[in-house]
Each structure stands twice: as C-alpha cells, then as structure tokens.
Image (tube, rainbow, N blue to C red):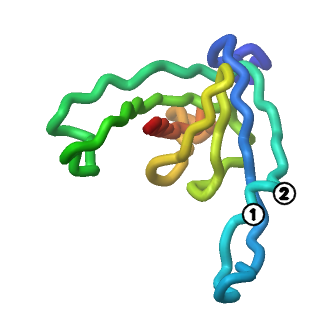
Amino acid sequence: MNADINKLGADTVTIIRAPISNSSRDNSQIRDWSLAVEVDYPYCKVEPFPTTKNRLFIEVEVQREFAANYFRLWLVPGCDVKSTDRMRWRGHEMDITGVPTEWTDFEGEVVYIGVLGYIREG
C-alpha cells in the first residue's frame, strides 16, 4: 500500500482518554478527565456537519440558550479511538457520538475510521 494513501487531510486530531476511577461521593465508577492521556493523530480530515432543527438535536430547547455543532471526522487507520473518548481539533473539544467505525476498501484494507463529534456550548 502506498504510504500517502493514509494521508486523509491536513488536520491533526487529538484523542483524549480518561481512566475510570471511583467517585468519592458514592463510590460509583466515573471517568477522571484530570488524569486523561492525549495522543495526536496527524493527516486526518474534519468537516462541519450541518444539522437542522428536526434531525440531530435531541435536547428540548425550552427556554435554553445553547449552541451545538456536529463534525464528521475521518481518522487515519490505526487511530486508537473509542466511543468513551473525547477529541480536540483546532482548540475545540468534542464528545464522540456513536461508535467509531473502520471503513475498508474492496481488498479489505482499512481506509479510515469514521467518527461523529459533538460540541455543545451553553
């Protein structure tokens, strides 16, 4: 395989993974984002994902002021990403929506890992 085939774009995406620890309040297991580990993946592609009021908005907007954006991310093969991780791109930290999925070509080689990111402010 040509090494350039894994270069999907010019974006660097940081995968942020937090370990699970026990809550001091009720001993339940929670992610401790203060101990998160970050790994950068260059050559990814990120694009805003347009939404409409009726499609991907799950929250009820009754007397709330917030902004939400979705992003499509094409991550390079071999990127270690899980649905419980967070991502950062150009200073924007986002949650992962759904399960990261490997996409393959007709020979079965992984071409990219598809992820949908979500940012909510307010």
Residue sitting nearer the eye, 81 or 27: 27
Q: In this view, does 4 lie to the left or right of 58?
A: right
Residue sitting nearer the eye, 16 or 104: 16
Residue at the left extreme of this rendering: 54
Name above or below for residue 57 compared with residue 88: below
For residue 111, say whether it is visible: no
Residue at the bottom extreme of this rendering: 26
Identify which residue is drawn at 22% across, 50% down: 60
Where is residue 34 shown, x and y percent of the image? 80, 55
Q: In this view, does 52 lie to the left or right of 19?
A: left
The quadrant of the rendering that contains the C terminus is top left
Identify which residue is drawn at 67% across, 24% down: 91
Name above or below for residue 53 compared with residue 5: below
Quarter location, residue 26: bottom right
Quarter location, residue 50: top left
At label 2, the amino acid type is: Leu
The quadrant of the rendering that contains the N terminus is top right
**Label 1 sits on residue:** 32
**Label 2 sits on residue:** 35
Residue sitting nearer the eye, 32 or 116: 32
> Could you give the CA–CA distance between mark 1 and mark 2, rounded to whole angstroms?
6 Å
Residue sitting nearer the eye, 59 or 117: 59
Q: Are marks 1 and 2 in contact (CB under 8 Å)?
A: yes
Where is residue 24 shown, x and y percent of the image? 74, 82
For residue 35, say whether it is visible: yes
Q: Is residue 80 left or right of residue 39?
A: left
Where is residue 76 shown, x and y percent of the image? 68, 31
Element type at marker 2?
Answer: helix
